[in-house]
Amino acid sequence: MEKEWRCKECDTLLGVERGARLYLRYKQAQYIVDGDYAVLAVCRNCTTVNERSKTERAQERAATRA
Ligand SMILES: [Zn+2]
């Protein structure tokens, strides 16, 4: 399952979640984040700090199920 991670302010695409991994790409550089992560991304468009963590996702899933 693929899920886009977008800036909360301007909707710029920051990365993509695929399964348990988070894929980040900018120009020539590509990052794949795995394991128990907490990532901060500064939006390249509006400089808003966006946060993403696996713990947060687990909580979201639990909330959806309840
Ligand atoms: Zn932004």
Image: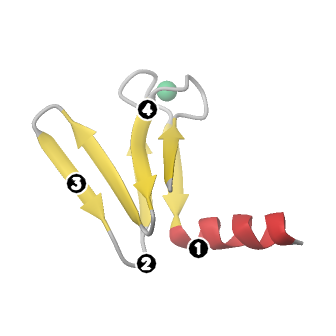
**Residue 18: % across, % down:** 42, 57
Asked if marks 1 and 4 touch (Cβ < 8 Å), the reply is: no
- The answer to whether residue 15 is left or right of residue 9 is left
**Residue 3: % across, % down:** 52, 48
- The answer to whether residue 62 is left or right of residue 35 is right
Kind of residue at badge 2: Asp
Asked if marks 1 and 2 touch (Cβ < 8 Å), the reply is: yes
Sequence-wise first label, 3 or 1: 3
Residue labelled with disc 3: 31
Q: Secondary structure at mark 2?
A: loop
Sequence-wise first label, 1 or 4: 4
Kind of residue at badge 3: Tyr
Query: Would you place residue 64 above or below residue 9 in this image?
Result: below
Sequence-wise first label, 2 or 4: 4
Query: Would you place residue 10 above or below residue 8 in this image?
Result: above
Residue at x 37%, y 78% (from the top left corner): 35
Residue labelled with disc 4: 13
Asked if marks 3 and 4 touch (Cβ < 8 Å), the reply is: no
- Answer yes or no: is residue 42 visible: no
Residue at x 60%, y 34% (from the top left corner): 8
Kind of residue at badge 1: Thr
Residue labelled with disc 2: 36
Q: Residues within 10 Å of mark 4 (few under 14, many from 20)?
A: some
Give the CA separation, mark 2 to mark 3: 15 Å
Query: Which quadrant of the structure image shows residue 19?
Result: bottom left
